[in-house]
Image (cartoon, rainbow, N blue to C red):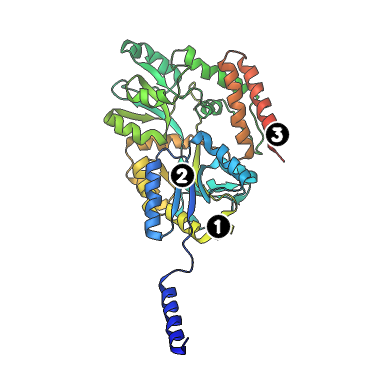
Amino acid sequence: MHLRTLIRGLAGLLALAAVVPLYAAPKLVFWNSQQNAELLAAITADFSKTSGIKVETNWLNQADLRGSLLRHATDGDLPDVVLVPTDFLALDKELKYSDVPPVGKSSDLVPNAAGSGLFEGRNLGAPMFWGNHLMLFYNRSLVSKPARTLAEMTQQLPALQAKGVKALGTNFGEMYWMVPFYGAYGGWPVDAKGGITLDTPAMAKTLDTYFGLVTRGLTLKECRTDCALDRFMAGEFAYAINGDWAMRELQDALGDKLGVTVLPQVEPGKNLVPMYSGYVLAFPGLSLKGPKRDALLKFMRYMQSAEVQRRWFDETRHLPVNATVYRDVLAKADDNLKASLNQLKLARAMPNDRGMAFAWEGLAKGFSAMYQGRVSATEAAKLMQQHAERAQRRTDY
């Protein structure tokens, strides 16, 4: 080969290298279980367009997300990033989350949300949105003055029944709906050290009051999500206990007929204490220590940006963690959003402690036994504690 030909060939290769990247941009695998899955997919698609980083967005049912993550951890093929409730951070031993570095100033995030990614002193999650608290929705065409206590709601019952309307739509068998009653009597599923605290007089009182909603005719034992959402929107129930995640859908369905207020007191002076929590971006399999680190951090910054946070709130009514957007939301809040924020003041953060995961299992076990009529309230509380501690012993190591 002539020297001139060789030089021309080398020049051509150098020119090609200048326009063709030496490696393709990484593809991020992102899991979520959000009700607004289409919106989240659109947001990640926009990120891909602007950044050149492809994101494979996979939706899983909330009930399957925990089990799927644990199975994939065993198989060694975890996603790069997940959007999960904060109590999932307690799975750090199994999922091996990366520590999330601080991005920007601490004042960039809403204070109540900023610490939601902490677990045992480590920052394992980047806050995405927060709230997720229960409140009382009511139909203004059926209720002129919302009940402040369960006793007041009981007094309204005959007038509602005369209209062919039931009183309260709930997700009766879901423990997230029962925990506020436990808080009203001074109880909480775990203590300050993360110890499980279910076998208490407060839990027995909680169960009696909670099942009393059925015996008093306020709700139906078989009520599930349909009562708190679809059947409430259809006008079958005057009230519904539901979360801020349902507010947008309820507003779209009921318009001016939708009212929001704080949960009714179990008795005067005893407020229900719902949990509030955050959703965070977490990085299992130590993904931030791998070759996709820069792409993942860019994705995280995008999801916390004012543009995305404002879009997410407008479409879902989930409270933003971006402080600038949150201040704007507060300034423009309507009466229903103000009521939701008032309820949030009475809420308590859902513990991120590892014991909370087992407390949920124990709560469900004891509740189920009482639901089936096999045990009393006191016996159910004891069963809750025993099952939760047994489950914890099986998995702690």
Marked residue nearer the N-terminal end (1 or 3): 1
Quadrant of residue 146 within the rendered picture: top left
Residue 331 shows in this picture: yes
The amino acid type found where label 3 is placed reads Arg
Q: Nearer the viewer, residue 276 or 172?
A: 172
**CA separation, marks 2 and 1?**
25 Å
Q: Are marks 3 and 2 in contact (CB under 8 Å)?
A: no
The amino acid type found where label 2 is placed reads Asn
Q: Nearer the viewer, mark 3 or mark 2?
A: 2
Q: Give the side of residue 279 with respect to residue 359, left or right.
A: left
SS for callout 2: strand
Reply above or below: 25 against 283: below
- For the residue carrying disc 3, how many other residues have a C-alpha within 10 Å: few (<14), some (14-19), or many (20+)? few
Numbered mark located on residue 101 in the image: 1
Q: Give the side of residue 290 with respect to residue 261, left or right.
A: right
Q: Position of residue 213 (x, y in %)?
A: 48, 17
Q: Nearer the viewer, residue 332 or 383?
A: 383
Q: Position of residue 132 (x, y in %)?
A: 46, 37
Q: Which residue is mark 3?
A: 394
Q: Which residue is mark 2?
A: 58
Q: Are marks 1 and 3 in contact (CB under 8 Å)?
A: no
Q: Position of residue 202 (x, y in %)?
A: 60, 23
The amino acid type found where label 1 is placed reads Pro
What residue is shown at x 32% (from left), y 21% (from top)?
235
- For the residue carrying disc 1, how many other residues have a C-alpha within 10 Å: few (<14), some (14-19), or many (20+)? few
Q: Nearer the viewer, residue 232 or 328?
A: 232
Q: Nearer the viewer, mark 2 or mark 1?
A: 2
Marked residue nearer the N-terminal end (2 or 1): 2
Numbered mark located on residue 160 in the image: none
